[in-house]
Amino acid sequence: MEEGEFYSIEGFMLEYTGEDHYTVSVEFEQADTAGHHQANKEVQILSIDPENTEEKFEITVNGAVGNTYQVKFINPKHDPTNRRSILMHDSGVIVDTDAAWRVRRQIVNYFYSIWGSNVEVVKVNYDADDIETTDSSLVVKTVYTVTVLRQINGPSFTTASIVMVSGDTVNVAIGAPIQQSTPPLSGAF
């Protein structure tokens, strides 16, 4: 930074679980400062503008017929020496024809409990030619794209699998994240 120059700073803080914080501080390197943290009356501006990318993964349903399933998440933060550490988490029961908000409601507890994060779920239907459609009579495939709404270090799950609750065929699949999260900011700035 250069003396006499102003630097614009914009801060944006998202509070998810009560453990997040946002701090801005300035250290002066002059010996005659009066000892009070506001002894120098001047405008201080700080800026950190990272590129934020959220993790995304997909749940794909082929030929939805009303089967029910659960998603089993394996927690990458599991600590076997801590008896309160969760290794596996089963979602609530999901119907393969559910709306996006219902799928979100059944999986969000894992993300809240492990990552302190909410998730967003977007549902897109496709026809036999793999073209997006809103005509329910043409739907042969549905893709739910799940976005983890917090920057995290590494993937939000080690593995995830589908456990069919009802139905004769396994028509649901979940893949590894298609987009990784940028790591959260850390350190002393």
Image (tube, rainbow, N blue to C red):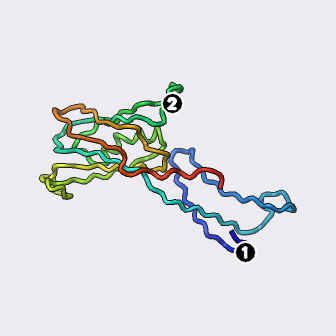
Structural crowding at the residue carrying mark 2, measured as other residues with C-alpha within 10 Å and reported as few (<14), some (14–19) or many (≥20): few
Q: Number of callouts in the render? A: 2
Which residue has dot 1 on it? 4
- Which residue is the extreme one toward the left? 137
Query: Residue 169 versus residue 34: which sits nearer the camera?
Result: 169
In the displayed structure image, the side of residue 61 where residue 117 appears, left or right? right
State the image coordinates of residue 40 (x, y, percent, origin top left): 79, 65
- Please tell me the numbered disc located at residue 79: 2
- Helix, strand or loop for disc 1: loop
The picture places residue 170, in percent across and down from the top left corner, at: 20, 36
Residue occupying the point 42% across, 50% down: 180
Give the residue type that dot 1 points to.
Gly
Give neighbour class at mark 1: few <14, some 14-19, many 20+ (Cα, 10 Å).
few
Residue 140 point in image, percent of width and height: 16, 49
Left or right: 75 as drawn, with respect to 28? left
Q: Is residue 44 above or below residue 103?
A: below
Which residue is situated farthest in the bottom direction here?
4
Q: Secondary structure at mark 2?
A: loop
**Of 137 and 5, which appears nearest the observer?**
5
> Where, quadrant-wise, is the N terminus in this rendering?
bottom right
**Amino acid at dot 2:** Asp
Residue at figure coordinates x 75%, y 58% from the top left: 27
Quarter placement of the C terminus: bottom right
